[in-house]
Amino acid sequence: MANPAIGKLRCNTCDDVAEVRQQCNGERLLYTICPNCGMDRRSGAKVQAMWREQMVGVDDELPEGSAESGETPENTWLPDEQTCPESENQETEKAGTGTWVGLGIATVLAVGLAFLGVRYSGGRG
Ligand SMILES: [Zn+2]
């Protein structure tokens, strides 16, 4: 543990704060230590560049993962609002068809009852 933390970044896996340290020997590669995911010593150029880009100073504030998601709920919910009306319209059309069928059946029943009423009244008269 001779290497002091030179920065920190938000772990891509668990969103917790991971320490960024630098190897003293060799290529002075960065590596990260996440309290949940453990040490990440990948030496790939892309990983190293990503860490350098994402890391902040030890005393700096990391952008909160919750704050980042707090900006997007409206955008996140928009697609749902766009898809919901479609399904609602489909359901409304089905409901409308059912209503018309129900009205037709009610009309037939009413007419039939009216005829029956006429026949009964005529028989008695
Ligand atoms: Zn992690």
Image (cartoon, rainbow, N blue to C red):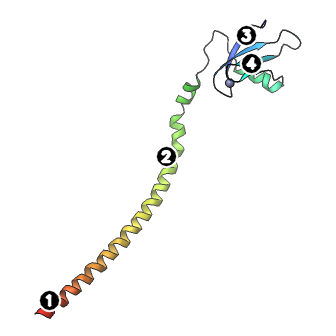
Residue identified by numbered label 2: 81
Q: Could you say which is closer to the camera, residue 75 or residue 39? A: 39
- How many angstroms separate mark 1 from mark 2 (CA)? 58 Å
Dot in front, 3 or 2: 3
Q: Which amino acid does label 1 sit on?
A: Ser
Q: Considering only order in the chain, which callout, 2 or 1, is on the residue closer to the N terminus?
A: 2
Relative placement, left or right, of 36 versus 114 is right
Dot in front, 4 or 3: 4
Residue identified by numbered label 4: 32
Quadrant including the C terminus:
bottom left
Residue identified by numbered label 3: 6
The reply to whether callout 4 and callout 3 are in contact (CB within 8 Å) is no
- How many angstroms separate mark 3 from mark 2 (CA)? 45 Å
Q: In terms of secondary structure, where does tag 4 sit? A: strand
User: What residue appears at the point 27 percent right and 83 percent down from the top-left corner?
Assistant: 112
Q: What residue type is labelled 4?
A: Thr
